[in-house]
Image (cartoon, rainbow, N blue to C red):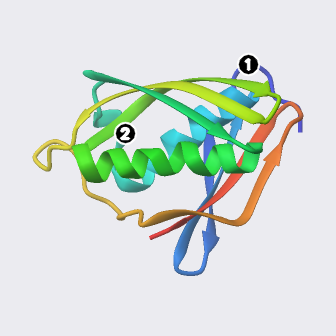
Amino acid sequence: MKMNKEYKKFEFFDVTADVGYKAYGNTLEHAFENAALAMFEVMTDTSEVKPRIQKKIEIMSEDEYALLYDWLSEFLVILDSEFLVFSKFKVKIEKENDGYVLKGIACGEEFDPSIHESRAEVKAVTFHLMEINNENPFMVKVILDI
């Protein structure tokens, strides 16, 4: 499946008792950005989330799978502790001797139930059936525990 500049950011698929999705991009970084967007779309309507607050995130992990898991899990910690939801993401991934480093910026705002729709509560990111395709189109597959 070849993708031009315009592509589907993500798509959901059926998983018993959980939520699964595939996120796409022209680079692995774009796929990670869209994976975060898809996760927040599970929780709320991201089109209603304004980029008022910018949060810098830096993660080191031993491989790309752990990096994806840690990237998404970091947002669950931020949501639980600071009540922030995000709709815009920028990611840079670099390979280092002992693994990978992700430097990211997420833009969003504090969750406001009078503005933001409350959808499913995401309990955790899982490694179950996780996939990463490093060819264009880049794709990451994620299962969320809800």
Q: Which residue corresponds to mark 2?
A: 46
Would residue 83 be visible to someone looking at this image?
no
SS class, disc 2: helix
Residue type, numbered disc 1: Lys
Callout 2 amino acid: Thr
Dots 2, 1 in contact, CB < 8 A = no
Label located before the other in sequence (2 or 1): 1
Q: Position of residue 19 (x, y in %)?
A: 54, 66
User: In the image, residue 22 lies at what x, y percent?
Assistant: 68, 51
Residue 124 appears left or right of 51: right
Residue at 86% of width from left, 30% of height from top? Answer: 136
Asked whether 33 or 24 is in front, the reply is 33
Q: In what quadrant of the picture does the N terminus appear?
A: top right
Q: Can residue 28 be seen in this snapshot?
A: yes
Q: Nearer the viewer, residue 64 or 10?
A: 64
Q: Is residue 42 above or below residue 38?
A: below
In the depicted structure, whether residue 69 falls above or below residue 67: below
Residue in the picture at 68% in, 28% down: 29
The image shows residue 69 at horizontal and vertical percentages of: 61, 51
Q: Residues within 10 Å of mark 2 (few under 14, many from 20)?
A: many
Write down the residue under mark 1. 5
Is 127 placed above or below 45 here? below
At 44% from the left and 70% from the top, the residue drawn is: 146
Of residues 140 and 41, the one nearer the viewer is 140
Label annotation for residue 115? none
- The single residue placed furthest to the bottom in the displayed view is 16
**Does residue 8 lie above or below 42 as drawn?**
above
Callout 1 secondary element:
loop
Is residue 143 rendered to the left or right of residue 55?
right
In the current view of this chain or complex, which residue is farthest to the left? 114
